[in-house]
Image (cartoon, rainbow, N blue to C red):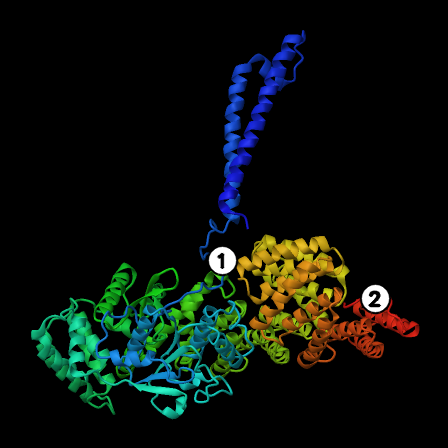
Amino acid sequence: MAVPGRRRWSASFAALVSAAVLTLGVVVTQVVALAVNAASDQQAWWWGLDVIRRYPFPSLLVGAVLLVVLSAVALSVQRSRAALTDPSQADDGAHPGAAVRIEQPRRTGVVDAPIGELPTVIRGRDGVVADLLAPSAAGPSPVRVLTGLGGCGKTTVALAAARAARADGWQVWWVSAVDGTALVAGMSAVAREAGAPAEEVAAAGSDVALAGLVWRWLERVPGPWLLVIDNADDPAVLAPAGTSVAGGTGWVRPAGSGTVVVTSRVTDARVWGHRAGLVPLGELDERSAALMLLDRMGRAGEAELMPAAVAVADRLGRLPLAVHLAGAYLGSGVAEVGLTAYLDLLAARSVGMVDEGAPGWGTRDPRRQVLSTWEISLDALERQGRVRARTVLRVLSFLAAGSVVPVSMLDLRVLGSAGLLSGGDEGRVELAAALAGLRAVGLVESAPAGTTGGDGVLMHPLVAEVSRMQADREGRRRAFLAAAARLVVAGDRRLHPADPGDREAWRLLAPHAVALRDVAVQLDADLCAEVVGVNNGLTYHLVARGSYPAAIDHGEHVAATAAQLLGDEHPDTLKARNNLATAYQAAGRLTDAIALSEATLAARERVLGADHPDALMARNNLAAAYEAAGRLGEAIPLLEATLAARERVLGEDHPATLMSRHNLAYVYQAAGRLGEAIPLLEATLAARERVLGVDHPDTLMSRNSLAAAYRTVGRLGKAVRLFEATLAARERVLGAEHPHTLRSRHNLAYAYQMAGRTGDAIPLMEATLAAFERVVGTEHPETLTSRNNLAGAYDSVGRSGEAVPLYEATLVARERVLGADHPDTLTSRSNLACAYQAEGRLGEAISLHEATLASRARVLGEDHPDTQASRYKLALAYRAREEHTHPEGSPRGD
């Protein structure tokens, strides 16, 4: 990479040299003009020299001015180019069209702390914090499960442990287990920070494989570290299919140099197993609870208040959350009473709550304590004119508790149309006042919304639970839930699932979309369909960013929810199945992808009509799945029909039409019809650059496919240049280890090999194969292609001892994963036969060649180039057997 300072110096030097040359040219011209003028009796000058002859000195002055201007322009152009190419000056803004690198930055310390700023002093929990971080007496550190009722301060204690560990130099990670999607995303980030490449965890073949991979990387992390898994109140979330929390095979496991802390309301030791040490967390002692109350009031040093503080804290059951809320209220500008009068209000409120009907609530139930404190706070806010505070609290409680809600997500138009806020500027003032009041009394906490530091709020899960209960009692649950759903739908409309610039926004929206997915049954039919639509977009987004296991997990939930609530043939149900099939195909689950794609296409044609855009999309996706499975005879006619229909229905330059054109060209190439493939690829690339832009992921796909076609026909110089440009763009746009980037790197390495640059090819192939194995798994079709080509590279330089075992392993895996007649399996069989032949194992080689030729003739056709190659290689093997020798230059591979 060029050094930025050196590049700017080069630009300046070039501009100065240009200016000097031009100046010399003017001076020489001036001298020549004067000499000619003196020696000539005729005035037959062409215009430029005639002007110089007549006005020599003004001409020199004008020339000098022009040179200065040209030099400035040249320097400006050089600087502009440097700004476009120099990473130190590139625009990293997440706006449409920006070349944004989507790989998340590595971070250490408390990650995404869920309750805002931790208090400086944590009362009454020092011993618990020390126990959590204490080393194990023998063997690996056990899992510590911090258990207790909601509101007892589990998250605060875990945060205190995280702060203490970080201060001692530990590496610390924080993951939310509020639902499966949040857990997968969080553990993916942990694996990346533990050293795994950016897309490794997200692209694993299943949640089970993902969990195993995360812990393999964590076991390699040197030195002490702490992983906190917060809000694990549903143990099923911690146990992917076929695994067990108690057995240590799920998401929670002991690890050598690390400490794992889980916070949960589940106190049953059988759930956690013998490897876990339960750390029960109860109420605070009397003194600690009173001091915590005074801390929150900002009056910690006033000893005379201790008796009253003890009485209030005791009335609240010394529950940390209730004490926090009471102290936040009493220490705010909202409070209208002191400690003694507040105790009287608590008594009245608490009795009132029981009298109004809270069945099963005892005097020390945490929900009762929380409700008592906050109702006093909300009453005071209303008396001070913050009349919408209670309403805003109710709406927030139906979003994902414990996840940041960006303030920008609280759309005034949505809340206004629902009658929850006033319209226009008045509603804006009401919302700001409500949020300020809720923050002041501690019912919500401030939190940064995203990496850009936007304004956001967090709500404690117990506060959200009690608020939803209150909405039920008020008979307004459906209204508040609908408002929350419409906020999420409105947020989704501003995003595109495949735009890297929207990735951070999708990260913030995702937990709220999932939360509403799980309660969509409570919405009316139209709004339910819209919530399913948002979650369909989330599946698409997860596929586009290469997070295949997360996409499959989410997509299966969405498809099941849509079928249950909307019906099997509702358009949004069919879209959910289409997106799930796409996720299956991306993850290499071709049998599942084809079955689901066939069913989805049949349903869409029946429900929507054969030419509906959604039906055409399903037809295109099914053809792509057929191609991936090697069923070219079914893929080509389906793609040809789809392209013709899209050109007729959508137009020739519609992005969907361009996708069909690209896919058809790609399958032509796979079928050996290169004379048709290359012109179609060239035209599609030009159209995509014009319509979508040069760095759009679809444009990069076209560029990669065209380079592969050039490589196939031997135009290696053009292929290498195009592969190098595509790889650089994908690294910049998608990230260094996105599956598509790895594909580009693999293709470039293979092109190097074909061009005779094996010294460049083999190290790049080895690194790419290792990356594919980490990112998509050891038996993903992409990994098998990479392994086959590395074996071919070894073979080409005489390293047959390494090539043959790799060929054999690849053939066995392809037969198992893709089937015996898949074109890639036939390629492996042919390559192994050539390797056997080179080693003199002619009997084995001829048997393989004969079987490969028969299969290729049946699957690909007699005239396919691969079939012809097999026929030629078999002939060479027969000749070698007759001559009992190995002909030089015998071709290897396909």
Question: Marks 2 and 1, Cα distance to the nearest angstrom?
Answer: 47 Å
- Name the residue type under label 1: Val
Q: Which residue is mark 2?
A: 890
Which structural element holds mark 1? loop
Residue of label 1: 100
Please report the residue visible at 35 percent of the width from the left and 84 percent of the height from the top.
Answer: 145
Say which of 136 and 238 sits in front: 136
x and y, in percent, of residue 704 in the image: 64, 60
Q: Quadrant of residue 702?
A: bottom right
Identity of the residue drawn at 54% across and 19% down:
60
- Quadrant that contains the C terminus: bottom right
Q: Quadrant of residue 867?
A: bottom right
Viewed as shown, does residue 728 lie left or right of 115?
Answer: right
Residue at position x 31%, y 78% in the image: 461
In the image, farthest residue toward the top = 41
Q: Residue furthest right?
A: 882
